[in-house]
Image (cartoon, grey):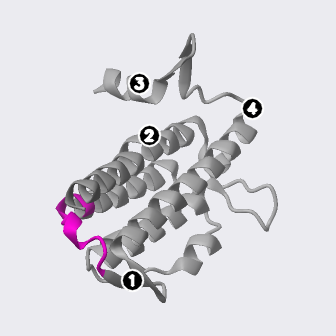
Amino acid sequence: MNHTGQEFIARARYHLTDDFLPKIERCLECLSDDQVWWRPNEQSNSIGNLVLHLCGNARQWIVCGVGGAADARDRDAEFAQRDVVARAELQALLKNTLSAVDDTLGAYESKRLLERRTIQGSDVSALEAILHVVEHFSMHTGQILMLTKMVTNSDLEFYKFEGTNAVAQWKNDAASSA
């Protein structure tokens, strides 16, 4: 279990910080503040609401639920926000949240993955809590990508195809700007 657990944690960290975060950042860079807060109808969420929600969820489930920090989340406020919060502020919040998540996961002992936690009233293992956040982040990242494509009417060009091989462009962009 230890090697498998370590690999599970490593992959969770990778997906959150090296896959989903750069994609969301690219979306935020393509949009104006007003576009970040646009919603197709009142029943739908804006990209801004989704970013706030992802931060609240990841912090509650991993930093607090798995890591033991105090939980002060106001989930309803994530969806109720209607005033424009600047893209730069949302991006900083997302980066800081995922940095705290990554620090928590980096310090977490894989042998403790089956320990039970109560998060949002649910009895879950630490493994289940981590999996929940990765799955949840994946789903909402897809929504953010779709909304960005709708608003900008453009391809985000995350991949370049060389024959049958897909080359991740956001990784190349990050490496060249470092």
Residue identifier under label 1: 72
Name the side, left or right, on which 2 lies relative to 142.
left
Q: Residues within 10 Å of mark 4 (few under 14, many from 20)?
A: few
**Pointer 3 residue:** 173
The image quarter containing residue 43 is bottom right
**Residue drawn 24% across and 55% down?**
6
Mark pair 2, 1: CA separation: 27 Å
Q: Sequence-wise, which precedes: disc 4 or disc 1? A: 1
Residue 158: x, y in percent? Answer: 54, 29
Give the CA separation, mark 3 to mark 4. Answer: 21 Å
In the image, the segment drawn in magenta is 105-115
Q: CA distance from mark 1 to mark 3?
A: 36 Å
Residue type of the residue flagged with mark 4: Asn
Label 2 neighbour load within 10 Å: few <14, some 14-19, many 20+ = some
Q: Is residue 111 magenta?
A: yes
The residue beneath circle 2 is 22
Within 10 Å of disc 3 (Cα), the crowding (few <14, some 14-19, many 20+) is few
Please rate how many residues cluster around mark 1, counting C-alpha atoms within 10 Å: few if below 14, some from 14 to 19, many from 20: few
Tell me whether the residue at label 4 lies in contact with that at label 2, contact meaning CB atoms closer than 8 angstroms: no
Task: Identify which amino acid the numbered label 1 is placed on.
Answer: Ala
As displayed, is residue 164 above or below residue 10?
above
Would you say 63 lies left or right of 35 here?
left
Choose the circle earlier in sequence order: 3 or 2: 2
Determine contact: label 3, label 4, CB under 8 Å: no
Q: Which residue is mark 4?
A: 153
Instruction: Identify which amino acid the numbered label 2 is placed on.
Output: Pro
- For marks 4 and 2, the one nearer the N-term is 2
**Residue found 48% across the figure and 89% down from its top:** 121
